[in-house]
Amino acid sequence: MQIMQAMNIDEAGNVDRSMGTDGSLIRLDGVHKWFGTNHVLKGIDLDVATSEVMVIIGPSGSGKSTLLRCVNLLEEPTEGRVWFEGADITDIRTDLNKVRTHIGIVFQAYNLFPHRTAIDNITLALTKVLKVNQEEARERAREQLRHVGLEHKADAHPGQLSGGQQQRVAIARALAMRPRLMLFDEVTSALDPELIGEVLSVMKQLADEGMTMIVVTHEMGFAREAGTRLVFLDEGMIVEEGNPREILAKPRTERARNFLSKVL
Amino acid sequence: MASAVATETNPPDLRGPTAPFPLATLGTGAAALVLAALGSLAIQAGYAVGGGPLSAGCVAVHLTPQIEGSLGVCHIVEAIESPAETMVLWVAIALGILALAAGLAAYRRQDTKRKRSHAVTGAILGVQAVQLAALLLWVRSGRPDRFAFHFLNFERLKGYFSLFLTGAKNTVLLAFVGEVGGIALGLLLAILVISKSRAVRAPARAYINFFRGTPLIWQLSTGYFLFLFGLNMRLSAFNVAMIIFALNTGAYASEVFRAGIQSIERGQMEAARSLGMSYLQALRYAVVPQAVRRVIPPLMNEFVILIKDTSLIVVLGLLRSQLDLYNVAREGYSDTFNATFFTATALGYLAITLPLIRLVNVVEKRLRSGLVGVTGAP
């Protein structure tokens, strides 16, 4: 069965979504990651269904970011498989460039292209990867900038924007690809406290619209209000998993209790 | 008793009295330097314009009327050996020492930073004046007549002006074509050399090491015969030179590009890849455009170096119309046996390179201040 699922990517790398899906959009199956001798992820199994907002928390060095980066294969798992829409994307025959157009990611350091304006940051991949024509790309970019409340900054360079604005452009850039899954890697950690709110409210709005999201964060308020599921990661293993409100209010394990007592 | 208590509670005043004359120190130092430099030049100009006929002294050192340009050389020698020059130099030395002493004695006890800066600058200018005057005195004690005869006989350059212009044009042409070709080749090599695949990296690395590890003059001479005999191509020596300069510059430019590309944060590549771009697309649209801006100053420095290295085409037999600046001087020297042509060539190189060096500095400053929106910093 797994082999069948691995095969349902056609020659062009298009994922055939008609078969092999059991409601889960992304599935991690026994994922291990070593950096040299450093064992960062120790057998992660995870299922995220469409429209879920999964929040991942855990102490620094617990492997949260690595786990997230294994989802769109910016990091290649040393062992284990990652399934996206029923297809095994760790199979080396997979056209990863194609898969990544369906999975948006937003980074802690924004990673906007500093030599391009906000709108050109967004249109770049639309025109070069999705081959959308320039006019339509600009229309889609403007629509996304409106979405994050930055239409008036379309022609600004990243260097002329505040951290919060840059991060919202980065979100718009990812959304313009019309992804089916959005990954957020500690997107508010580099921001000044007064700028965190504007980014979180964009993310909440996105969650309300039904976007499937995996969010690595230290914002427990966001986890409580927007999260549909919470994962507590420690030393490369999932220690606790369940309803965010319940876990945050009453962690079952000593390690989670310990961690939460420090951050809440 | 009361005053003793006061000294205990208030810390003693460590400032000392304020020293006088900061501006006078600056003035003295500046005057000393101006006197040594402009004074000597003025004396030279005076002799050049108003100097008399060949003096007995000049004839005694073989600057006879039969020698072309001997009068001009004689005036230069007479000017530097004149009593006026003696006075100018010794007064400059005296003023310089005075400024140095006054500045050193007083700079710590100025009451504003501006005044302190005046005193220090005055002392520095004084030292420079003493150095310049001492150097000129040293030259004077040698054989300025011989040096001037060989290197400063500007009369002999007459009739060569258009050849110098051709030389300057050829120098710029050779360097420009070499640099442009080298930049294109260098960017390609840089992309190959940062590849994860050893099979891609190795040949590019071998090429770069070979061209960086052998002398350019050897590359020119052997390259010429490689084209002529090895490849049986009828290329002119001038065209061969342009090709070799491009091949050589490519090796150096590739290292500049490699460093530039590797200086772009890893997040840029990751952001581009996460949007579905291929590795080469990410390089082309996200990484290289930023790297190119960062390496503009070092590439311009390479260009300045190449301008001077074009003189190595000396090893290729070139037509008179194909000569570069340096070889124009050699041509003139072999016509006249006078080395003033080399002096003129040096001035010619400076006329080309100084504006370029200035431009590099301006570009570098603008890049650093982020005015052109390169670094992404506000």
Image: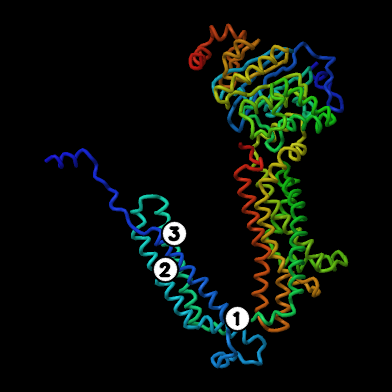
Sequence order check: which comes first, mark 1 or mark 3? 1
Q: Chain of mark 3?
A: B
The structure residue drawn at horizontal position 11% and vertical position 41%, both measured from the top left corner, is B1
Expressed as whole percent of the image width and height from the top left, the position of residue B271 reads 70, 31
Mark 1 is surrounded, within 10 Å at the Cα level, by few (under 14), some (14 to 19) or many (20 or more) other residues, namely few
Sequence order check: which comes first, mark 3 or mark 2? 2
Amino acid type, label 3: Thr
Amino acid type, label 2: Gly
Vertical comparison of A169 with A223: above or below: below
Mark 2 is surrounded, within 10 Å at the Cα level, by few (under 14), some (14 to 19) or many (20 or more) other residues, namely many
Q: Nearer the viewer, residue B362 or B247?
A: B362
Q: Nearer the viewer, residue B242 or B197?
A: B242
Expressed as whole percent of the image width and height from the top left, the position of residue B356 reads 67, 58
Expressed as whole percent of the image width and height from the top left, the position of residue B18 reads 31, 53
Q: Are marks 1 and 3 on the same chain?
A: yes
Q: Chain of mark 2?
A: B
Q: Nearer the viewer, residue B40 or A12?
A: B40
Expressed as whole percent of the image width and height from the top left, the position of residue B372 reads 66, 43
Give the residue at mark 3.
B121
Q: How far is mark 3 from mark 2, CA to CA?
A: 12 Å
Residue A92 seen anywhere in this rendered image of the structure: no
Sequence order check: which comes first, mark 2 or mark 1? 1
Vertical comparison of A209 with A139: above or below: above
Give the residue at mark 1.
B49
Residue B168 seen anywhere in this rendered image of the structure: yes
Task: Find numbered disc 2 in the image and state the secondary structure of the residue it sits on.
Answer: helix
Whether residue B237 sits left or right of residue B62 in the image: it is right
Quarter of the figure with residue A101: top right
Q: Chain of mark 1?
A: B
Checking the image for residue B67, the label placed there is none
Checking the image for residue B96, the label placed there is 2
Vertical comparison of B5 with B335: above or below: above
